[in-house]
Image: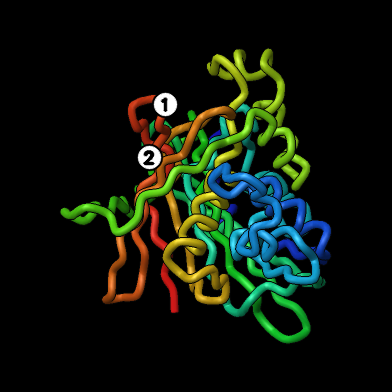
Amino acid sequence: MPIDAAKAVAAEPRSAEIGWDHKDVLLYHLGLGAGSFQGTPGPATDPDELRYTLESKLHVLPSFATVAGAGKGVIGGLTGPGLNISLASVLHGGQSVEIHRPIPVEGRAVSTSRIAAVYDKGKAAILVLRSEAADDKGPLWTSDAQIFVRGEGGFGGDRGPSRRIELPGRDPERTVERAIREDQALLYRLCGDFNPLHADPEFARLAGFDRPILHGLCSYGMTLKAVVDTMLGGDVTRVRSYSTRFAGVVFPGETLRIRMWRCLEPARVQVSVTAVERDDAPVLADTIVDHF
């Protein structure tokens, strides 16, 4: 049965209380490779890495918003009124997070999720799942997940925006490479995404891949960490918002090449992320970090 876009968008928002503490934040940072900065000798004691791995110095990378409360919002948001979706047809097409104030190391919040838009791409549909979190001090973050649903288009709806961002016509200010450990997907999935696509070779083959792939949101977090560390002086509080489009997969054992361009008006960093071992195959595209 096709998606009923009007019913999906009109559905009542769903609210749930979520909580996290320093252990959840530490696990998330370790899942992104924190503590192994550039593979240098003794990286676990690097002062810049201890900000991510030692509770007495801990700050929270803003992309933690995508997994706070075990990151269950995306899957739960695909089962509401007007939606009859097979999870086998679902791909995470893009992600954005707007930070309203720094995320505390420990907290409780109410997360409210709804379908903000449904776009008809012909052979597929795109759902925009919006989650807003607030605690007793006010709003914390707004997160938009763009969910690509194969075979669910053709219902006559709006095609939606086509957002493609040209890279600057100059050399990047910074280029860094970040190695993905062979076990990184196994660790990152403990943040809440237990899809066997990221762990089970047999399941991965059924999905059309030679082997398990890394979570797109892991690449997303690794990239933001690289931008914060190299372009924003290691200060997570400078991040205002962060958006990307998932342009291709990356496998554990590969290396991300992260190119960064500084823009002054507005204050932002534009980013390109590719897989080194596959001739710079695209991983993340249309990637922007707006900052203070």
Q: Which mark is residue 121?
A: 2
Q: Position of residue 81 (x, y in %)?
A: 66, 50
At which x and y percent is residue 120? 40, 43
Residue drawn at x 60%, y 38% as measured from the top left: 215
Tell me the kind of residue under disc 1: Glu
Q: Identify the residue at the far bottom of this view.
A: 137
- Residue 277 is tagged as 1
Q: What kind of residue is marked 2? A: Lys
Can residue 5 be seen here? The reply is no
Task: Name the side, left or right, on which 245 lies relative to 209.
Answer: left
Q: Is residue 10 above or below residue 123?
A: below
The picture quadrant where one finds residue 260 is: bottom left
Q: Position of residue 233 (x, y in %)?
A: 49, 71
Please identify, in this view, whether the residue under mark 1 or under mark 2 is nearer the observer: 1
Q: Which mark is residue 179?
A: none
Q: Nearer the viewer, residue 238 or 176?
A: 176
Name the quadrant of the N terminus. Answer: top right
Question: From the viewer's perspective, is 190 left or right of 84?
Answer: right
Does residue 117 lie above or below 57 as drawn?
above
Q: Which comes before the other along the chain, label 1 or label 2?
A: 2
Measured Cα–Cα span from mark 1 to mark 2 = 32 Å
Quarter of the figure with the C terminus: bottom left
- Given the current orientation, which residue lies at the most extreme left position? 169
Q: Kindly identify the residue that appears in the image at 39 percent across and 25 percent down.
A: 278
Q: Residues within 10 Å of mark 2 (few under 14, many from 20)?
A: many
Q: Give the structural element (helix, strand or loop) at label 1.
A: helix
Give the vertical position of 227 relative to 158 (above or below).
Answer: below
